[in-house]
Amino acid sequence: MNTPVNRRQFLRDASILATGSMLLNASNPDASAAFAGRESNPNALVVDPEPLFAISPRFYMQFMEPLGVTDASVEAAWDYDRDDWRADLVKTVSDLSPDTIRWGGNFIRYYKWREGVGPLQDRPPMFNYDWGGKETNRIGTHELVDLCRRVGAEPLICVNFMSDGVRRHWKTVHGENRCGDAEEAADWVSYANDPDNRERKKHGILQPYNIRWWQIGNETSYASDGFQLDQAADHTLTFAKAMKKKDPSITLIGWGDDRGHDGRFWAGEMLKRAGEYLDCVALHMMGMRPRRKNTVLAGDAYQREPEQAWEELLELTQTVESRIQRMKAIIESQHSSACIAVTEGHLSINPHNSNPILQEWLSSVYHARSMNIYQRHGDRVSICTGADFCGTRWTVNAVKVQVPRGISYLMPVASIMRLFKKHNGKHGIGTLSCPADLDVAASRSDTAVYLHVVNLNYRKPVQTTFAVRGKEIAGVRVFEIAPENPRQSVDQDRPDVFAPKEKVLPPGRTWTWNFPAASVSAVELQLKA
């Protein structure tokens, strides 16, 4: 089930397979037996410890967008009694430990950043034209950076890109002009990063925020009444020049996705015209459509056929794989070093954004395998996300917030991201052999190998023997999420139901483990010096 990370890895693995155990360290009988007996032992899980690429320190991202009265994601996360972020949210997000938190989404098309900075009494409320109601602007640049610092994340700011060309946001039904130009975006960079910015100092913030990551626009290709590709590329160049002029050290993300998944990615033309200034191109991994005519991925039909739902969710990950591969090919055709930033990505199936399957472990096969796909393509993928960040009602969130007060807890997608983030190496490595029903992404640090393992089989456990080519394993720990029933759901009364359980393997000549059906695990292989 594992796709080679790239052509170089495929050729290396093929060479290794051809020469067999001659390439193994003779002093490592466990690895030699597992590798040399690959044909007679199809359940061996053997990895090559040679580093293939560095895993981005901004890899696991969460995405925050004010959603008005539709789902009070940002407002509900604020404790107005204490005038601070809710303590339960900070605690939960600190445990989730995202690498990056992005401020953006559809609302950025009419967001005026100056309305969200400075004295609270001077911040006017804004109409939330896409999602309904109003936002108080109580949470803005300073509050976002503050949350990031508390939970150990790096902020990523998405700027108003001339409303992505959508004219209804230029002059709204309330008569406001909500379009943001290149000068406004550049001023935001200066406000955040210039040590001498007078406007920020006037607001009592003496030290710069040093926000390094910025995205130009949001879903620019999706709006039928927005920019055409050539317009977007020209304006991207203008924005990039203006923003880099204020701070040449910032990292810029341009829009690279297609127009509603029509197959024509914008990344190639963006890199042709503005590639000198762009470090990444963005795509959003959403709009997953079931492939079967008799699909159960709508409403509550999955509850009658949960195993079919599992199979269909697994099928949807093929779209994740193919879209990443196509984006990589486009970037490489431009001879560009740009990375891929999946700055939004959630599984929305009918009913829109609120299907209850996303609170159940059934959804784990899609989330976990998608995360593995991103990591296996870590030579290009610099940022990925699997959900919206926090909210009160939608099931596509990573963190569910109780209102008006209570606890915050992790949805299944967030439990998986937390598991994989906490048990991960610094470099991606290749998998030489693996049982057919396991999906694996492997990484390593100096002294350990890490395996992110998904048992794709809904009903049967899979037994495997671990081995590392040329290395001897000194110890194995498994961190496992394996509910007895894949229909297990998380809620405020059972917030820790998907907490991983740690298992330590007893020492022996071989290191063998049985992955339960429909389980997601992180495995740490400690290597002998």
Image (spheres, rainbow, N blue to C red):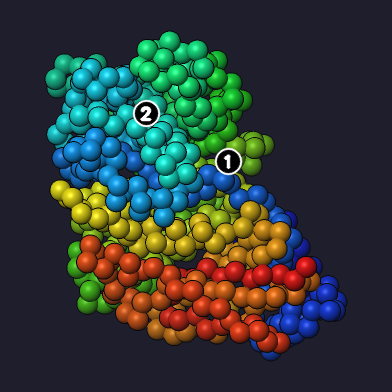
Quadrant of res 518: bottom left
Quadrant containing the C terminus in the rendered view: bottom right
Residue at the farthest top position = 198
Separation (CA) of disc 2 from disc 1:
28 Å
Residue 423 location (% of width, % of height): 54, 62
Residue at the farthest bottom position = 40
Mark 1 Cα within 10 Å, few/some/many (few <14, many 20+)?
many
Secondary structure beneath dot 1 equals strand
Q: Residue at x 48, y 22 (%)?
A: 207
Identity, as a three-letter code, of the amino acid under mark 1: Cys
* Residue 142 disc label: 2
Residue 465 location (% of width, % of height): 63, 82
Q: Residue at x 22, y 66 (%)?
A: 493
**Residue tagged 1:** 339
Q: Which numbered disc, 2 or 1, marks the residue that appears first in the sequence?
A: 2
Closer to the camera in the image, 130 or 417: 417
Q: Residue at x 50, y 42 (%)?
A: 341
